[in-house]
Amino acid sequence: MSAGLQEVFERAEALEEQGDWGGAATAWGEGLELALRGGATGEALRLVFDAREEALRRAGREAEAIDRVAHAALSRAAAQAGGAPVAVPWFAAGEFGRAAAAWPAFAEDWAADGHAAYTRELDQRMRGLTRGGVHFAVVSLTVEEVEAHAAAHGLDPGWAEARAQAAAEALRRADDPRVPWPPGRNDPCWCGSGAKYKRCCGA
Ligand SMILES: [Zn+2]
């Protein structure tokens, strides 16, 4: 929680202690603004929203525009959290070179910097979007799986779309092909380097 939000919590709770629900509602309103400005959609926003709602009710005040904005943000986050994860196709070290050899477009996008850089970049992209509320399922694919999916659906196997579809289809199979992501900070990195996640792709 930000220092600003921490200060609001302390101030608003002190006002509640004094029975000043109008003052508390105003303070919680400042908290809502702070949380929304920082892009918060999670637990901090929920806590402030609930506290503000109670304070407004006890003070006999109506909800305002900020409350409707916060409600919309919470609804959106809940919809994403309840949605299916986004399947992310990934090639383990042994498959990566085969994929680059099979598909020039893949090689152009990823091969120059090697497997470690490829995995690290995927990790960074996913971490960025995870903070925005997106859920990911990393799916380890083989070249053959992508080729088979592409052939069955009339796709160019070198397209990113073919890989994305193959990953999504693999997720629906009974044997879960997921690579657990993200690993714990002190667990082995998912890229297979053997290093701790926090010192490897999670750095
Ligand atoms: Zn790694």
Image: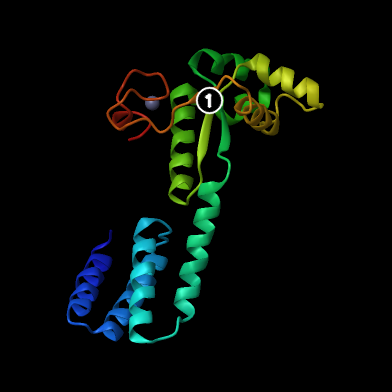
In this view, 122 is above or below 10: above
The local secondary structure at tag 1 comes to: loop
Q: Position of residue 145 (x, y in %)?
A: 66, 17
In this view, 116 is above or below 22: above
Please identify the quadrant where the N terminus is shown. Answer: bottom left
Task: Compare residues 13 and 91 and report the one nearer the observer.
Answer: 13
Q: Kindly identify the residue that appears in the image at 34 percent across and 63 percent down.
A: 47
Q: Position of residue 179 (x, y in %)?
A: 48, 25
Can residue 92 be seen in the rendering of this structure?
yes
Task: Compare residues 199 and 113 and report the one nearer the observer.
Answer: 199
Q: Quadrant of ligand 1?
A: top left
Q: Kindly identify the residue that appears in the image at 33 percent across and 70 percent down.
A: 51
In this view, 183 is above or below 38: above
Occupied quadrant, residue 96:
top right
- Alpha-carbon neighbours of circle 1 within 10 Å: few (<14), some, or many (≥20)? few
Q: Kindly identify the residue that appears in the image at 50 percent across and 54 percent down.
A: 78
Can residue 34 be seen in the rendering of this structure?
no
Q: Position of residue 147 (x, y in %)?
A: 71, 18
Please identify the quadrant where the C terminus is shown. Answer: top left
Occupied quadrant, residue 41:
bottom left
Identify the residue under disc 1: 112
Q: Kindly identify the residue that appears in the image at 33 percent across and 78 percent down.
A: 55
Q: Position of residue 149 (x, y in %)?
A: 73, 22
Occupied quadrant, residue 14:
bottom left
Instruction: Judge left or right: residue 182 versus residue 166.
Output: left
Instruction: Judge left or right: residue 165 versus residue 82.
Output: right
Instruction: Judge left or right: residue 110 versus residue 47.
Output: right
